Each structure stands twice: as structure tokens, then as C-alpha cells.
Amino acid sequence: MVSDLKKRGTAVVKGRGGGLCSAPNIEEGVSPDGVLRLANKVTSTTVDNILDAASSNDPAGQTVRVNEDALEDTLLFVGILSGRGYRHRRLAVREAWANQCQVPGVSVCRFMLSEDEVTPQVSKEVEQHGDIVLVREKTNYKSILLKTFFVLEYAIKHYDVRFILKTDDDAYVHVEALVHQLRLLCMSADCRNERLYMGRMCTESEVLLQPGHKWNNIVFYNHTGLKTYPNYMMGGGYILSGDVAKMLLDMNSKMRLKFTPIEDATLGFWLMSMDLRHVDHPKMYTYAVPCCFKAPVRKEGQRIVTRFQLQDDIEQQICSNDPWIILHKIDSPTKMRYIGSKVNSCNKTADSMSVAPSIAAWVKKKEAPDDEDATPTEVILQRRRLNSHR
């Protein structure tokens, strides 16, 4: 029988200013070789061919070849990490936001589970919803990086995708607002080759080296000699443009990326040498602390406890022209549905889809970058864009 899935662990480390940065984990030495498939959507013959390729000793044979002309076009692919014991979370996520994410040509959402997490109940869920991707690896709470890598691989091999969001099944994603903001941030008309890495940035996080510590990362220290991680976007939700994801897949197929025990920090380490556009988005609540409700209050002489109340800053901004894009660590399905209902009940005005203040600086820089502050790549792209309109 399938073994029980352990709960994913989360390291909490302090960034600059005392901010909290979450970092799920992966076992040392795990190889990214494996296979992905959309459950109940791929024929058995196709799956057999993929499995044969994945088990080959030839690195080139481990890459599933696809016909790029046949790929479905989409602006945004959302990979939601989940597990066998979290059906209740997936149902709440679908009701709150993921069902609305399934818009042909615009956005698509998929839950990521490993094949060893398939139970009769999961199989029924697969047949009913058709939105679960199975990873051919045994996964547990230390293998989050492996599933994250497969989010990138699956998105690139099955879609002509512009942007990829990795998130978790305890996160609310405001997909409509995110899609609008991504389009505003695009440097090109078709949003290709955007070199984008967007999320909530964690800075100056310590590499934990204490022997026996759950989040010890001696692997990273031995490999780099660093006691502080390079800046990275926190793991509750971050976005890579399709060109960046393709580059990572290509690098891994040729020389193997170094997998170390902290998922989001490892991704930042992989990307640190690339000339990317880093967007530190203040409306992505991707911290390790629970979001984002007030503690329940029992009034004296009453048996009834106050119902859910969002924290004031969340409540004020959730329906604003600059809404929260991601709210992570929502600790119950009922709260997930509550946030979904709040967003769906917002009165949308003519200004509701204007340039949000939280990204205005990056949109302005895209439109008219200062040559002194812009990177060489930004200068070249801007000159090409201007020339194309003459």
C-alpha cells in the first residue's frame, strides 16, 4: 500500500529588518530525473514512452520531447504543490479561486502530487476534476524542491507559457489581478523573453549549520562557502517567466543543477548569476506565519465566538485597486472559502484594473528606464522596443 505522506516542514529564518522567510525542504542528493503527467489526460501508450525515456541512462533521453507547434498557448501556468492527505484543501482552493483560473489562452492551474500519493480517493478526485499532475517520484516533506522543478518542467513541456507561478495548497491567489499585472509588466507585446523573477524577496537569510537541526543546510555551505543565502523570493508563491524556466531545464539537462535542502533559497541560488528583472512584490503575503485573520473573541456572557475577521490591512486592501495577489498559510479550508467569497463580492470599478501602486515603479521603469540605473540587457530591450514602433 501507499505509505503515508508526511507533513511538509517549513524553516523560519530572519531576513533583513526581522522579516520572516519560509523555506520548505528537500533531501540531499535527490535527482530531478523523473516524469510528469496530467492524470487521466494522457494515454497509457504515451505514459509508457515517457517512463521509458525517464529511466534511460542517457541524459538526453530523460527529456520528454514535445511538438512545440502543438502546445496550448497560455499566459500563466499555476502549479499548486499538494499531497495525498490534503483533499480538503484542494476542494477549498478550487471553490475559492482555482476553478476560475481555468481560462483557455489566459491561465491554467494544476495540483502537483506524486504517484506514490495516489489512493482510491485521489483517483476519484482525478476522474472528477482532471486537474492533478502526477510526479513519478516518492515525495515527502523534504522533497518540495523536486516537485517545484517538475512544476517548471510540466509547464514548459505542455504549454506555450509566458509565466509560471509555483504556490501551495494553503495559498489564495487572486488570478485575475495577477494576470492583469503580468501583462502590464511585459516588456514585449506578446510577453515573451521577459526575464522575470517575481515574489516577496527574502534578504540576508542565514544558512543554518547546527548538527541535527531540521533545516540544516551544510550541503549548501560546503558547495558555496556562504553562510548567508543570496536574495530569493519566498516559497509561498513566486513567478518565473517562461524563458527563465526553459533556461533552468536546459542547464539541468546539460550539467545538472545543484539541488540543496531549501527549495526557495535554492531557486534563488540557481538564478543569482542571471540578468533578470527582480520584482519584490509587496502584495504577495508568502511568509511562514499564518495569514491573515484576527484571533477569535468571545464576548463576556456570550457563548458565540465572533466569526472570521480579516486583519485590518488585509480587509482594507482586498477589494482595493491594489489588491493582495497571494495570501499564504491560510490554515483552514473554511478560511480559504471565506477569502474567495470576499474577493468575488468586491465591486469592480473602472479603475479596478488600472496600474496598481505596488507595481507602478516597475511598470514605469519598463516604459522609460534610466540608462544609468538599467542593466545592459534592459537598455538593449528598450531600444529595440522603441525602434519597433518607429
Image (spheres, grey):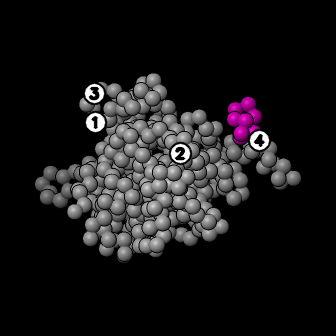
Query: Are circles 1 and 2 on residues that touch, CB within 8 Å?
Result: no
The boundaries of the magenta stretch are: 369-380
| Mark 2 neighbour class, 10 Å CA radius: few under 14, some 14 to 19, many 20 or more | some
Q: Which residue is mark 2?
A: 252
* Image position of 55 with respect to 216: above or below: below
Q: Which residue is mark 3?
A: 211
Distance between the Cα atoms at labels 2 and 4? 28 Å
Q: Choose the circle earlier in sequence order: 3 or 2.
A: 3
- The residue nearer to you, when weighing 222 against 359, is 222
Q: Quadrant of residue 116?
A: bottom left
Identify the amino acid type marked 1.
Answer: Lys
| Residue located at (36% from left, 47% from top) | 143
Identify the amino acid type marked 4.
Answer: Ile
Distance between the Cα atoms at labels 3 and 2? 30 Å
Identify the amino acid type marked 2.
Answer: Asn
* Image position of 335 with respect to 223: above or below: below
Label 3: which secondary element: loop
Counting from the top left corner in percent of width and height, residue 67 is at 62, 66
| Residue located at (54% from left, 69% from top) | 103
* Image position of 353 with respect to 258: above or below: below
Q: Which residue is mark 4?
A: 380
Counting from the top left corner in percent of width and height, residue 94 is at 39, 66
Label 1: which secondary element: loop
Quadrant in the picture for the N terminus: bottom left
Q: Which mark is residue 214?
A: 1
Badge nearest the viewer, 2 or 4: 2
